[in-house]
Amino acid sequence: MKRFFSLMRRLANCQLPIANCLPIVIGMPLTQKHRIALCLLPLALLLSDAALAHTINYQLEQQPSHYVFWYYLKLGYQHIMPYGFDHILFVVGLCLLSEKIKTIIWQATAFTIAHSVTLTLAMKGIIAPQSSIIEPIIALSIVFVAIENLIVSELKPWRIAVVFMFGLIHGCGFASSLNELGLPRNAFGLSLFSFNVGVELGQITIILSVYFLLTKWFASRTWYRPRIVYPISICIAMIALYWTVQRVFLV
């Protein structure tokens, strides 16, 4: 706090480089009032972000806690199954490079932890991700996973870190969707927690489906990669590339 007020005094007295540069940039001198307004602008922006951290769901504020929990649990699950087609393809891509279900679930858990962090930060208004940037990156993350399945024959240790990083990006995408509905002020933590649990359950549903439909029966076959992993990964990559172009140029 002392440093903050020290910076304010220095700016007001024209002791910071920005105060000396601005008159040249805007072509007019800065008065004392201008300098004070300049130093208060970042604070005003921070306060405005905090005030608009997330949309408030007033209807759910009147509901009991167990209703809120199940409501957001279902919402989180449905955000993956069946409505989150891009997230479904991402998780399917994760399933194709490993034969062990435990390893796949660990990847999904790392993804959930990561998206929980950015989702919470975004809903609190600490970060303000732009959909126009986040959505194409989400599509590119799916492309990356699909191409990796084509060029790597076995799971590498660093994939958990890559999945975690992509989880941070996907969490920003979750935030934009969740913010449309809003969260109750008196159950902010509970609703976020149940939403994340729902997302994790949705991912586990996909993992179990892929495992028991494909991996468990065919992963040990010599033709598994050329006949199953390669074609599915190519399809995922092509769909995700289309989404990337669409989200960059057509939206």
Image (spheres, helix red, strand yellow):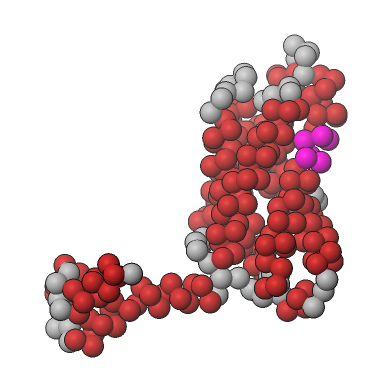
Residue in the image at 19% along x and 86% along y: 32
101 with respect to 67 (left or right): left
Q: Is residue 240 visible?
A: no
105 with respect to 111 (left or right): right
Q: Residue furthest top?
A: 222
Work out whether 51 lies above or below 212. Answer: below
Task: State which region is magenta.
Answer: 204-209
Q: Which of the 4 quarters of the picture holds residue 74?
A: bottom right
> Residue 248, position in %: x, y?
52, 55
Residue in the image at 74% along x and 50% along y: 197
* Near-viewer residue (150 or 206): 206
> Residue 229, position in %: x, y?
71, 25
* Near-viewer residue (7 or 118): 7
Secondary structure mostly seen in magenta is helix
Mark count: 0
> Residue 220, position in %: x, y?
77, 14
Q: Which of the 4 quarters of the picture holds residue 210?
A: top right
* Near-viewer residue (1 or 64): 1
* Near-viewer residue (127 or 191): 191
The reply to whether the magenta stretch includes residue 110 is no
Image quadrant where one finds the C terminus: bottom right
Residue in the image at 21% along x and 77% along y: 9
Q: Which of the 4 quarters of the picture holds residue 72?
A: bottom right
Work out whether 60 lies above or below 73. Answer: below
Residue in the image at 56% along x and 70% along y: 53
The reply to whether the magenta stretch includes residue 208 is yes
Work out whether 64 lies above or below 219. Answer: below
> Residue 250, position in %: x, y?
57, 59
